[in-house]
Amino acid sequence: MSKLLILTLCASLLSASLLAAEPHWQAQGYAPAPVDNPLKGLVPYAEAPDPDHFPHSMEFSYFPLSAVLKGPGRYDWSALERFLDAVAGRGHQAVFRFHVEYPGKRGSLPGFLVDAGVGLTYWQRASTPPRPPVDNETPDYRHPLLRATLVDFIAALGARYDNDPRIGFITAGLLGLWGEWHDYPKNELFADKALQQAVMDAYTRAFRITPVLLRYPAGAADPVYVANAGTPFGYHDDSFAWNTLATKPSYFVAKLQASDATTQWQTRPIGGEIRPEAWGKVFDAEPGLPMLQDFAQCVEATHVSWLMDSGMFKAGSTLERRARAIEQVRRMGYEFHVPRVSFERESERLRVRFEIENRGVAPFYHPWPLRYALLDADGKLVREVRAADGLTGILPQATPALRDQVFDLTGLPAGTYRVLLQGENPLIKGMPVRFANVRQDADRAGWLTLGEFLRD
């Protein structure tokens, strides 16, 4: 038998022996995960006066379609690029929405469309008192040029930005006031189902990775909206904790139930905005708002991951409000805990096995990889491995997911080493996914220490 064959057989036997070893589990202590973990939590407007006032990982902005669409098939992405770069420079992911009508603003629809015959209906819309009514201009959604232009725009947007690490989520927008898919109370002006379907189909083709969210769940019998349960879209509840729980048929959870979309959150994200009247106040022990619904109940019912709320990003919040907000916001989205770990050592290999459980209300929706590292006694990272598997598909309250990684120790000097773990954020300055464990950040910021071993 040749020496090469003998070495190959020995390596195979060693690997088989290592893989067959029974784990010796070590329990790991729980501690709350950081409230500013990526892709979850409260989201300020990017232009908020004090965006650092409350811990967060994302920022939001609206854009008129006219900001980027300058002519037929002619795009200037600089406004969107400036926003994305500024947000990424702060280590955050972006959420954004395009619109063609916005109460109180003119010129959202590109001028070349108006010149080509796309009509505008001018009307006044009531505002929340004591603010006065505002002017609005709604385009003719039935005009074939507008329909074709929106489809072409979505294709161009997806070709440029799908899977861009600077982007967390996109709300579909483009139709209705604020891009919020309604023209209330002028419902007769809103886009018909044919245009809704065309927009949804265009987003489905253009965005295969970056999540896109629709405003309203809808079933086959919905009189206004195209059925969207089971589609590749998530949802955003923009009247959160106000019109959320199913106390009326028009409220968000009731719409989820009526459209048979109550399990959509298991694969598609839920986001939205806390009702502006309740910004900040929703976290008070006594908000003094009769219409307000219990925030924790709304989180549990919707499995929401993120919510816009300017109230917590302005001066004036009490320490009590801030503490209650941190406690309740932490429940949004995912919270990953590693309950136990095992190390099995044979010759030049170390096998690390561990479980991940989700203590939050929603899964992780982005295909970010897990990253492992070995830390030496001097605090230096000496080996790093990016794994093929990540954190997607780990549902709340489900059986913990098992992860398994084998390290090749060949050439590693003798000494004590720690094994570290994180969910890798593809954004250069972005914070990684951190775990709800006592030893998170214990030895190196952004990393969970799984344990240590002696290399002799």
Image (cartoon, rainbow, N blue to C red):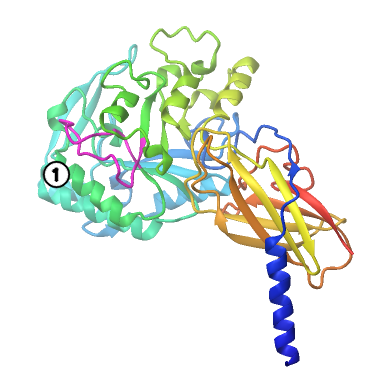
Residue lying at 13% horizontally and 48% vertically, measured from the top left: 115
User: What's the magenta region?
Assistant: 213-235
Quadrant of the rendered image containing residue 284: top right
Q: How many marks are shown on the rendered structure?
A: 1
* In front of the other: 416 or 114: 416
Quarter of the rendering occupied by the C terminus: bottom right
Report the predominant secondary structure element of the magenta stretch.
Answer: loop
Left or right placement of residue 452 versus residue 199 in this view: right
Left or right placement of residue 200 versus residue 55 in this view: left
Q: Where residue 68 sits in the image (x, y, percent)?
A: 32, 51
Q: Where residue 334 sits in the image (x, y, percent)?
A: 54, 37
Residue lying at 33% horizontally and 44% vertically, measured from the top left: 233
Tell me which amino acid carries mark 1.
Ala
For label 1, the residue is: 194
Quadrant of the rendered image containing residue 60: top left
Can residue 209 be seen here? The reply is yes
321 above or below 193? above
Q: Residue furthest front?
A: 1
Q: Where residue 44 sits in the image (x, y, percent)?
A: 49, 33
